[in-house]
Amino acid sequence: MARYTKSTCRLCRREGTKLFLKGERCYSDKCAVTRRSYPPGEHGQGRKKISEYGLQLREKQKVRRIYGVLEKQFRNYFKKAERQKGITGDNLLILLERRLDNVVYRLGFAESRAEARLLVKHGHFLVNGRKVNIPSYLVKAGDVISVREKSKNSPRFKEIAAEAAHRTVPEWLSADASAMEGHVLSLPTREQIDTVAEEHLIVELYSR
């Protein structure tokens, strides 16, 4: 599958906000947005008036890049959200939050969503005792996500376990860092999702 292979810091600069794509680096002084808070490229510091369409497009790109999904995937999530009951924008973010790679990241079992995606693809995680290596797998209420026994002894997972003990997980999840196991207590609500997004702009964009 095609993936963005250039500097991820350029994506944050393009959107003009931190997307937290590189874990701890995003919280340090090395963050590209902190050092150069303007879009990349030779015209990045020029003043441009953004149209209504431009605002909608940038919001869609921002959310898509935060969760690390491709355009076709994102559109499919939107179509699915549109068919569900409730507010389409809320449904869209809830679907994205339910992705296994995002849940692994939220549980503190990876430093970033990109790392979580890689760990899931390499088969390090179990869902209800069964190996799942599909990052886009949608978790359900009651699911148990755990690290495979063979993986727990690896140096990286020992580091992750030590770091996870100090991380706060969302209300809809619970994590046991010592056992490297997490539970999906319920499906998230919009209020429980800390992603800063104006999802109504995405709805307006796709409704054109």
Image: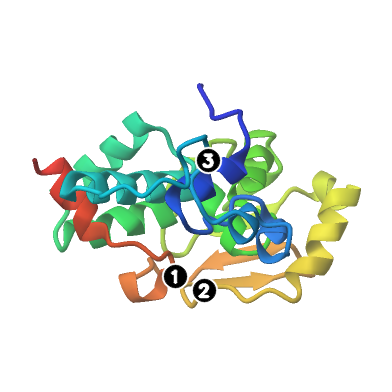
Q: Tell me, yes or no, whether the two marked residues, 1 and 3, touch with CB atoms within 8 Å.
A: no
Give the CA distance from mark 1 to mark 2. 9 Å
Q: Residues within 10 Å of mark 1 (few under 14, many from 20)?
A: few
Asked if residue 99 shows in the view, the reply is no
Closest to the observer, 61 or 70: 61
Does dot 1 land on a helix, a strand or a loop? loop
Q: Residue sitting at 21 percent across and 55 percent down?
A: 201
Label 1 vs label 2, nearer the camera: 1
Closest to the observer, 101 or 20: 20
Q: Tell me, yes or no, whether the two marked residues, 1 and 2, touch with CB atoms within 8 Å.
A: yes
Q: What residue would you read off at disc 3?
A: 40
The type of colouring in the image is rainbow
Label 1 vs label 3, nearer the camera: 3
Asked if residue 208 shows in the view, the reply is yes
From this view, report whether residue 131 is shown above or below residue 5.
Answer: below
Q: Earlier in the sequence, mark 1 or mark 2?
A: 2
Q: What residue would you read off at disc 1?
A: 194
Q: The residue under label 1 is which amino acid type?
A: Asp
Residue furthest to the left in view is: 208
Closest to the observer, 72 or 95: 72
Q: Residue sitting at 18 percent across and 44 percent down?
A: 53
The answer to whether 204 appears left or right of 47 in the picture is left
Q: Earlier in the sequence, mark 3 or mark 2?
A: 3
- Image quarter in which the C terminus is found: top left
Give the CA distance from mark 1 to mark 3. 26 Å
From this view, report whether residue 22 is shown above or below residue 193.
Answer: above
Q: The residue under label 2 is which amino acid type?
A: Pro
